[in-house]
Image: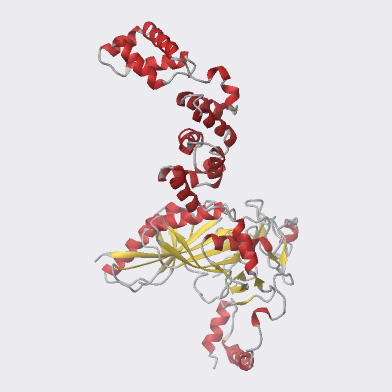
Amino acid sequence: MKYELVAGFETHIELATNTKIFCSCTTEFGGEPNTHCCPVCIGLPGTLPKLNKKVVEYAIKAGLATNCEIAEISKMDRKNYCYPDLPKAYQISQYDMPLCQNGYVELSSGKKIRLNRIHIEEDAGKLIHRKGDTLVDYNRGGVPLIEIVSEPDIRSVDEAKEYVEKLQLIMRYIGISDCKMQEGSMRCDVNISVRPVGSEVYGTRTEIKNMNSITFIAKAMEYEFERQVDLIESGGKVIQETLRYDDVTNTTSSMRGKEDAHDYRYFREPDLVTINVPKEQVEKIKKSLPEFPTQKLKRYVEEYDIPNTDAQLLTKYRKIAEYFEEAIDGIKTPKTASNFIIGQIFRKLENEAEKEEFNIKVSAKSLNELIKLLDSGKIKMNLAKSTLDKMLETGKNVYELISESDMGGIDDNTLLELCNQAIQQNPNAVNDFKNGKVKAVKAMVGFVMKNSRGKADAVLAEQKLIELMQ
Amino acid sequence: MVTHEEVQKLAILAKLFVADEELDKLTKDMEEIISFADTINNASVEETNFDNINGLSNVFREDVVIPSFSREDILKNAPDNDEGCFLVKKRG
């Protein structure tokens, strides 16, 4: 029998606010243990939480960016469980009146992964387990989170990967989180079940907790899918349980302990008042949102005639997209800018983190000037390319590197002269060419380019050289 | 009706130890608490807006950092600490 995968995601994202959700301690990552704490975030009796305005604003942005309805009235609730990472023995979260509901994330296939809700809550502290005891650091305790809960609409590992990447992209674009999975500012719980293809009923699901890498998510899902199918095929039954994924052995194992008692006894947080979001505020936030990556992608392909794969690279990080848009201001050939960025500028950036930072020596304005010279025919593509490389090395602008006299290319007589020189001074290459080594002409084109200081047209030079040698 | 088992379950959730001889009394107490809640449930509330019972909404704080407490102060009430952290013993 053939089985299909059914998966839903619960994604926790730390919001990039300056302060924690209910107190004014910093949310900065790292720091010596328990140095970002106060009586509120370590849950001392008698303290009162006060909600950070930015948290509500950021969560609304997240909701709008994922097509959610924003609740006019929502409230905070206590989720009770006893575990040392939670100093109050309850987490302040949202239960039956979340801030955002009924959204979706659209995949490149056009399929919509529906979102049940997005709510705000506080993060827990960090536990360091040792032999016999546990150390607790509450720096992370009280850092604001949004939890994005999807419907079980995901049907393959590829869809899961795209869903997580899309969320990451959207949240970074709207600037509410850096979504660094390695640092834990984005974490996923995955609910997985299997069912025979064509079946309408869901199978029993398991939940894999706290995954902090897309690669691990994919591996864990593949493993868990196989495990459940094997179990059913051999006459067994999937038990509803919480699992932990071990990336060393690439297996999942049952988690015991805090998840044993799935009885959170939610009730309204009496120390916090209702959150009331007027429609006007939602409209105002909506207007402040940037153009989303999917819209940009569509526009780049349709308006600028940029290939889809290139447009995807340009829109992956907001800084690159903004750079590109500034660089093509008033330019006839946006595709040239795209080629320069993807071909030459990306070579300077070693990894994804560097692409995201996009710290390069050439400003968008400088690139714009270079392309304008190219567009107007004042310089040729070869010269433009080599100049861009120099600009990337030195940080100088195009006018510091190319003088007026270098612009405008060279006339036919000069080209002829340079080609004749190339033939006279490279007898070996001429011989090679005459003996059938067609590639030998490239060395001579290089000679012409060098002696014309990049002004010659390489294609014309090659034609002329072949003509002269034949 | 509240059962002994329900009281024991609540005790486990709250990480409390309840001896068998205490169960009768606690079960009776719990029943009284719940019947009090039932009295409230029976009250007519159709006219009341429970979403905003204290008439307050949107009490917010600006997102401005205030220096945290010193670690010494933070750990002052901890039963035990080590390496700048709260120290918790493993439970059975």
- In the image, taking residue B74 as reference, residue B3 lies left or right, namely left
**B69 and A274: which one is in front?**
A274
Position in image of residue A168 (x %, y %): 51, 54
Quadrant of residue A52 within the rendered picture: bottom right
The residue under the point 71% across, 63% down is A23
The structure's colour scheme is secondary structure
Position in image of residue A435 (x %, y %): 25, 12
The residue under the point 47% across, 24% down is A380
Position in image of residue A138 (x %, y %): 65, 60
- In the image, taking residue B15 as reference, residue B60 lies left or right, namely right
Position in image of residue A198 (x %, y %): 28, 69
Quadrant of residue A85 within the rendered picture: bottom right
In the picture, the quarter occupied by the N terminus of chain B is bottom right
- In the image, taking residue A444 as reference, residue B79 lies left or right, namely right
The residue under the point 50% across, 75% down is A262
Asked if A5 appears above or below A449 in the picture, the reply is below
